[in-house]
Image (spheres, rainbow, N blue to C red):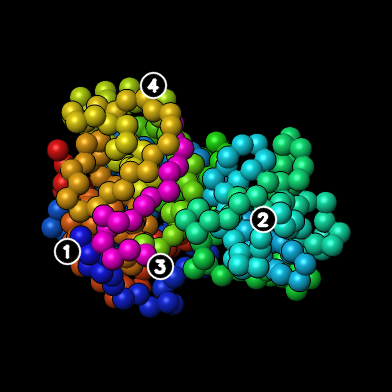
Amino acid sequence: MKVDIFDFELPKELIASQPVTPRHASRLLDLSVEGRMTDRHFSDLPDLLEAGDVLVCNDTKVIPARLYGRRGEAMVEVTLYHPVDGLSWWSFIKNAKRLKQGDAIAFYNDETPAEQSPFSATVIEKNAEDGVLLRFNCESSALPSFLEKFGFMPLPPYIKRDRPGKDSLWHKFDDKENYQTVYARCEGAVAAPTAGLHFTPEVMQRLKDKGVNQVFLTLHVGAGTFLPVKTENTEDHKMHAEYGIITPETAAAINQARQAGHRIIAVGTTSLRLLESAADDNGVVHPFAGETDIFITPGYKFKAIDMLITNFHLPKSTLFMLVSAVAGLETMKKAYAHAVAEKYRFYSYGDSSILKCVNKI
């Protein structure tokens, strides 16, 4: 189908640059009942769910995968997105045209200029589809500590931050805490599963008290989630693969709940995509460990979920296509028009919605 049908107008002032405080004070557009649209706050979520419902959350933890570097006079911005081994990563690089195979990039931060930096990488390969393959010039055991020291949270391109340096304003924003769910524990993502950013210990306790079961899977979100769809037709778009794990315990909890007639609610498009990758045509979720590049567009029949909690996504993005598959394209266009009119906050640090799945096997 044509990508243009997923376009819509969004005023730039509605793009959130930082989250609200506390997180659960964010707004929640409720479309959990088909044909109804209600304005709420995320703190209302426990009131919308029932005892026995299962919330499936992604417990991946974002690593500081954005790096700023220099190669001679060229300044580059690196976003790591896919590990090859302990020292090699595929990356997207701003100003990559200034780089060639064999070039060394020295990374810097607010305290250490590039010319004094002990942290660098070498360009191994470049190609138009996958970006730039870098190999870090250090021991593999030292790479995590170098990333912690020199890396920044890999915020999406629509959240603006200055480059590091003596006049940097990075310190104004606590992105290392804000761009992480409260239940993050498995390091490996280079983008946050943003639907989970609204959860707080208070909301999680209220859900538990009500009898809502919260289970976890892991999908290490890649920076490819932010890539625009450049093709005219959805059939021609290639998704980047991401690694995910569903344990036997999590699969069993989901299957038992479904068998008992309870609802399965995916927290975020990442959780949904992994569940659908692991489910068979009877809706049974199987343990999973591997990569998925599933691309969900309208017409897809969902096997594993009944509802979805998700943020508001970019026009013509794979994520807007996915939510349109869940609730219907016309429903989502009306919902987004309502969100714009009511000045909801959009994208990663923005507000949330809860959708009923209307297209199931």
Taking depth in this image into account, of 278 and 351 the one nearest to the observer is 278
Identify the amino acid type marked 3: Arg
| Residue depicted at x 61% and y 51% | 125
| Residue depicted at x 26% and y 55% | 235
Q: Is mark 1 on a helix, strand or loop?
A: helix
The answer for how far apart the CA atoms under marks 4 and 2 are is: 44 Å
- Which disc is residue 330 wearing? 1
Q: According to the image, label 3 marks what residue? A: 345
- Residue extending furthest right? 116
N-terminal of the two: label 4 or label 2? 2
Badge 3 vs badge 4, beta-carbon distance below 8 Å: no
N-terminal of the two: label 1 or label 2? 2
Q: According to the image, label 4 marks what residue? A: 248
Identify the amino acid type marked 1: Glu
Q: According to the image, label 2 marks what residue? A: 101
Residue 156 lies, in percent from the top left, at 51, 61
